[in-house]
Image: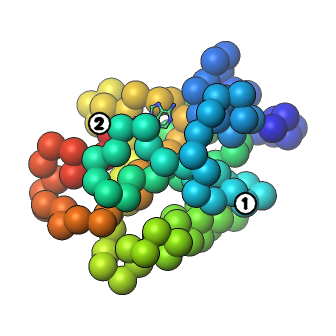
């Protein structure tokens, strides 16, 4: 998708911008006007879906109240994914990794939606996603 004026320009070769644009293959779970959800290539649980804004944002650090509508869209998309995957009732975890210490590998804001099994808290191993 072409960036709208005012969007953060995508860094060259952003993997998730490639997925949103369709130039990198993905298994789609949900596609809305502003958000895209697809299966994590290395799932940590029976359900492991990544929800991303179509607009490039590096991480939660790049988001503020001026993106309140987009944040609402992301929350709606997360809940729609949970309903579609049948984990809204059993429960699920939503994680976003920000920066190096959190192990953020892909510098395009994404929310891991993880469920379909019992998850430990505090998270251990793959329980937090990423
Ligand atoms: P993070 O550490 O929060 O940046 O997580 C990045 C996530 O992206 C990891 O869980 C990876 O398994 C996942 N991932 C990397 N490449 C792909 C891809 N091509 N399609 C789907 N998921 C991917
Ligand atoms: Zn991107």
Q: Residue furthest bottom?
A: 89
Residue 6 image point, x, y percent: 81, 39
- Residue corresponding to mark 1: 32
Q: Residue 29 at x, y = what percent?
A: 58, 57
Where is residue 94? Give x, y as percent: 37, 60
Classify residue 108 by image quadrant: top right
Residue 71 in view here: no
- Residue drawn at 13 percent across, 60 percent down: 120
Vertical arrangement, residue 20 with respect to residue 52, above or below: above
In the picture, the quarter occupied by the N terminus is top right
**Front position in the image: 47 or 100:** 47
Q: Work out how far the residue at label 2 is from the one at label 1, CA to CA, in angstroms.
A: 28 Å
Tell me residue 53's x, y (percent): 64, 48
- Ligand 1 shows up in the quarter that is top left
Q: Is mark 1 within 8 Å of ligand 2?
A: no
Up the image or down, 58 lies above or below 48; here it is above
**Residue on which the image places disc 2:** 102
- On screen, residue 5 above or below 94: above
Residue farthest along the top direction in this orientation: 12
Q: Quadrant of the C terminus?
A: top left
């Amino acid at each position: 998708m072409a960036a709208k004026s005012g969007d953060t320009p995508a860094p060259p070769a952003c993997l998730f911008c490639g997925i949103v644009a369709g130039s990198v293959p993905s298994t789609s779970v949900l596609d809305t006007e502003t958000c895209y959800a697809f299966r994590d290539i290395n799932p940590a649980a029976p359900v492991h879906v990544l929800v991303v804004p179509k607009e490039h944002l590096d991480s939660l650090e790049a988001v503020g109240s001026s993106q309140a509508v987009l944040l609402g869209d992301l929350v709606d998309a997360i809940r729609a994914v949970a309903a579609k995957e049948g984990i809204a009732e059993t429960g699920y975890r939503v994680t976003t990794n920000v920066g190096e210490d959190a192990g953020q590998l892909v510098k395009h804001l994404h929310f891991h939606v993880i469920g379909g099994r019992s998850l430990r808290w505090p998270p251990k191993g793959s329980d937090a996603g990423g």
